Image (tube, rainbow, N blue to C red):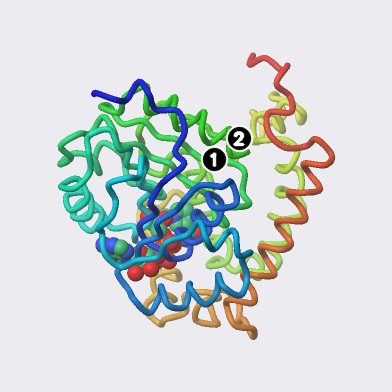
C-alpha cells in the first residue's frame, strides 16, 4: 500500500456520525489540536451541535471544526472515524460510499462496540486500511481505546493508530483476536446478564444490585482488574468458589425477557426518562453531571498516579 509507510499522525480527520459517541470523539481530537470534519446525515442534529459547541467550546476549538451533512471534501483527511449506528448493513453501505472518493492510504476506523472487523471490512476495496478503534463513553474522558486488527489490516496502520492514540493521551489496547464484543463489552455484558437475572429472580432491587456492583466490585476494579484482584484474594479460594458457583450463574444465550419488554415499551433509560430507574432530569443534564463526575475521578486518579499500566513492572505468571 503506497504511502502507508509515512503514516505517523492524523492531524486532519473526519468523524462520521455525530451522535452520542461521534461528538465526544470529535471533541477529543479537537482538544488535541486536530482539524476535524464532523459529518451527520441529519441536518437537525448538526444544527443542535453547532449551537452547543458555540456555547460550550472555545473560539479556537470551534475554528478547528467543520460540520457538514454530505460526504464531500474528504480529500485532505488522513483518517476517517466512523461512529454511525451499530448496524452492519448501514456501516458497509457507508464504507462503499466513502471508498469511492478516498485515496487508498486514508485509514478508516470504526467505533463499533463489537461487530467483528473482518465482517465489516469484507466488501472493502482496501481492507488493509481498515481498523477497529473502540472508544468508551464519554470518549474524551475514558482513557482506554480498544484497537482491533482484522486479518487484512496492515501492521503499519495498527502501529500508526496506537502511537497516535498514545500521543493523544489515551491507553490503546490491541485486541489479538477479532471476536464479537472485543474485551470490554464481553465483560460488561457478562456482568449485565447476571445483574438482570438477579433482578428477574427478585434477589434484590436494581438499586441494591447496583450498589453492590459499585462499592464492592467497581471501587476495587479502579485499582485492580479481575486477574490482579484474584491474585490478591488467592487463586485457591477462587477455585473453591468457582467450583460450586459457575453452574449457578446465568448462561442464557438470548437477551432477557425483562430487557426486551422494557425496550418494546420505550423505556430506554435516561434518553426517555425511564429504564431500570425513573429519571426526573433531562438526559442532557444527567449525562453532563455524569461526565463532570467522571472527569474529576479521572483527574484524581491521574494526580495520584493510579491510571494506566501502573504496575508495568509486574510480570504475567
Ligand atoms: N453509545 C455508546 O455508549 C457507545 C459506546 C461505544 C461505542 N459505541 C458505538 O459507536 C457507534 C455510534 O453509537 P452512538 O451511540 O453514538 O449512536 P447514535 O445513534 O447516538 O449516533 C449515530 C449518529 O449517526 C448518524 N448517522 C446514521 N447513519 C449515517 C450515515 N450514513 N452518515 C452519516 N451519519 C449517519 C445518525 O444521524 C446519528 O446522529 C455504534 O457503532 C455504537 O455501537 C457506542
- Residue occupying image coordinates x 63% and y 38%: 169
Res 135 visible: yes
Look at the numbered disc 2 and give the secondary structure of its residue.
helix
Which residue extends farthest right? 304
Q: Quadrant of residue 83?
A: bottom left
Q: Quadrant of the N terminus?
A: top left
Q: Quadrant of ligand 1?
A: bottom left
Q: Quadrant of residue 27?
A: bottom right
In front: 291, or 51?
51
Q: Position of residue 198 (x, y in %)?
A: 58, 61
Q: Is residue 64 left or right of residue 304?
A: left
Q: Is mark 2 within 8 Å of ligand 1?
A: no
Q: Position of residue 286 (x, y in %)?
A: 64, 74
In the image, residue 86 sits, relative to residue 223, either above or below, namely: below
10 Å neighbourhood of mark 1: few (<14), some, or many (≥20)? few
Q: Position of residue 287 (x, y in %)?
A: 61, 70
Look at the numbered disc 1 and give the secondary structure of its residue.
helix
Q: Position of residue 148 (x, y in %)?
A: 40, 34
Res 256 visible: no
In front: 96, or 249?
96
Q: Is residue 125 left or right of residue 288?
A: left
Do the residues under discs 2 and 1 have CB atoms within 8 angstroms?
Answer: yes
Q: Which residue is mark 2?
A: 242
Q: Is residue 309 left or right of residue 30?
A: right
Q: Quadrant of the C terminus?
A: top right
Q: Which residue is mark 1?
A: 246
- Residue occupying image coordinates x 52% and y 41%: 145
- Residue occupying image coordinates x 41% and y 50%: 113
In front: 277, or 301?
301
Amino acid at each position: 500500500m503506497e504511502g502507508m509507510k509515512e503514516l505517523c499522525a492524523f492531524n486532519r480527520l473526519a468523524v462520521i456520525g455525530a451522535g452520542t459517541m461521534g461528538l465526544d470523539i470529535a471533541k477529543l481530537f479537537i482538544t488535541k489540536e486536530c482539524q476535524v470534519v464532523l459529518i451527520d446525515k441529519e441536518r437537525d442534529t448538526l444544527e443542535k451541535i453547532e449551537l452547543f459547541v458555540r456555547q460550550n467550546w472555545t473560539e479556537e476549538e470551534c475554528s478547528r471544526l467543520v460540520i457538514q451533512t454530505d460526504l464531500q471534501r474528504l480529500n485532505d483527511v488522513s483518517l476517517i472515524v466512523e461512529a454511525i449506528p451499530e448496524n452492519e448493513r448501514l456501516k458497509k453501505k457507508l464504507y462503499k460510499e466513502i471508498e469511492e472518493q478516498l485515496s487508498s492510504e486514508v485509514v478508516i476506523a470504526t467505533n463499533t462496540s463489537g461487530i467483528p472487523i473482518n465482517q465489516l471490512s469484507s466488501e472493502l476495496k482496501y481492507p488493509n486500511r481498515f481498523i477497529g478503534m473502540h472508544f468508551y463513553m464519554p470518549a474524551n474522558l475514558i482513557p482506554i481505546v480498544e484497537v482491533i486488527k482484522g486479518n487484512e489490516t496492515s501492521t503499519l496502520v495498527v502501529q500508526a493508530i496506537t502511537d497516535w492514540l498514545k500521543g493523544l493521551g489515551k491507553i490503546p489496547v490491541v485486541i489479538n483476536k477479532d471476536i464479537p464484543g472485543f474485551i470490554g463489552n464481553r465483560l460488561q455484558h457478562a456482568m449485565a446478564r447476571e445483574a438482570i437475572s438477579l433482578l428477574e429472580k427478585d434477589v434484590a432491587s436494581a438499586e441494591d444490585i447496583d450498589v453492590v456492583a459499585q462499592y464492592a466490585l467497581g471501587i476495587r476494579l479502579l485499582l485492580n482488574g479481575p486477574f490482579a484482584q484474584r491474585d490478591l484474594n488467592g487463586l485457591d479460594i477462587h477455585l473453591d468458589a468457582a467450583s460450586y458457583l459457575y453452574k449457578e450463574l446465568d448462561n442464557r444465550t438470548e437477551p432477557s425477557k425483562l430487557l426486551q419488554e422494557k425496550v418494546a415499551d420505550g423505556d430506554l433509560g435516561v434518553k426517555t426518562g425511564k429504564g431500570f430507574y425513573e429519571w426526573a432530569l433531562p438526559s442532557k443534564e444527567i449525562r453532563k453531571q455524569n461526565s463532570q463526575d467522571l472527569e474529576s475521578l479521572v483527574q484524581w486518579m491521574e494526580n495520584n498516579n493510579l491510571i494506566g499500566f501502573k504496575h508495568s513492572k509486574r510480570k504475567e505468571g
